[in-house]
Image (tube, rainbow, N blue to C red):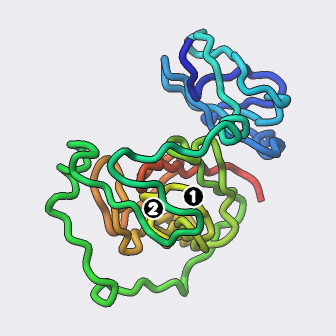
Amino acid sequence: MPSSRCSRRLSGGEFPLDKGSEEMGESIHPMIVSCTSCGAKYRYDEARFEGKPSKKIRCTKCQTIFEVTNPAAEAAVAPPAARPDNPSPLVGSDMTYTRKPSDGLAHEDRTKEYIVPPAKDRPQRSTANLRLPTGKRFSLAAISGTDAGKTFPVVKPRMVIGRTGADVNLSDAEISRNHAAVEFEEETVTLVDLGSTNGTFVDGQRIDTAPLSNYGEFEIGGTTLMLIVTDGQ
């Protein structure tokens, strides 16, 4: 049976993303899993692995049983495989892996005519009015890529996403050191590309800025992130 980020049972620590339950905050190490049969997404507490490499659980929407792999055990087995046409970056390397057209036709189609303007030519955005709204909790969840299953709480009104030295650090070699930012101005949330090498994408389109809403997804490098909004302080 193929391994997958998949379903859950509604008991003892797994919660669907489509229910804004206050209990979501009780999970110390939540990961986002999705059913490959129906695509339903859920939170799954890593503590439920109990040190085991995987768990079999049932999707309550389509009743299919899937195997969920423990990300901690997966990371301990082997580091991410190197691309055949590009050596793995050295540990601590400041290099960003640049996708080639052969990496995928879809990527070639959406980037071949896009030219990233130099940093000095990019308009400077004002951050004076940025603030998190009261009564809401925000987080960014990695739903695909090398960091799939991780969630990052939003702790300030401008969250920079990158590879090193950012507010949200991802272990994706295709992501720039400071790749993108998510900015909060009360109820308005804006995704901003920071002049990244490989771009920021929403619905398959490369963007400079784009609005984000609850469960809104965007792609940077080989990683897909989702914005999650719940009630609470």
| Mark 1 surroundings: few (<14), some (14-19) or many (≥20) residues within 10 A | many
**Which residue type carries mark 1?**
Leu
Left or right: 190 as drawn, with respect to 45: left
Q: Is residue 25 above or below residue 77?
A: below
Task: Give residue 149's quadrant in the image.
Answer: top right
Q: Position of residue 4 (x, y in %)?
A: 56, 25
Instruction: Tell which residue pokes out farthest to the bottom in this image.
Output: 120
Considering only order in the chain, which callout, 2 or 1, is on the residue closer to the N terminus?
Answer: 1
Residue 91 circle label: none
Residue found 52% across the figure and 69% down from its top: 93
**Which residue type carries mark 2?**
Ile
Residue bearing mark 1: 170
Determine whether the residue tagged by mark 1 lies in a helix, strand or loop.
loop
Q: Is residue 39 above or below residue 164?
A: above
Residue found 50% across the figure and 43% down from its top: 81
Q: Position of residue 130 (x, y in %)?
A: 56, 78
Q: Is residue 178 above or below residue 5?
A: below
Task: Give residue 115's quadrant in the image.
Answer: bottom left
Q: Position of residue 55 (x, y in %)?
A: 72, 21
Q: Nearer the viewer, residue 24 or 30?
A: 30
Q: Position of residue 2 (x, y in %)?
A: 54, 17
Left or right: 19 as drawn, with respect to 145: right
Distance in Å between CA atoms under marks 1 and 2: 8 Å
Residue 175 circle label: 2
Residue found 42% across the figure and 55% down from its top: 87
- Mark 1 and mark 2 in contact? Answer it, CB < 8 Å: yes
Residue found 74% across the figure and 29% down from its top: 14
Quadrant location of the C terminus? Answer: bottom right
Q: Nearer the viewer, residue 57 or 158?
A: 57
Determine whether the residue tagged by mark 2 lies in a helix, strand or loop.
loop
Quadrant location of the N terminus? Answer: top right
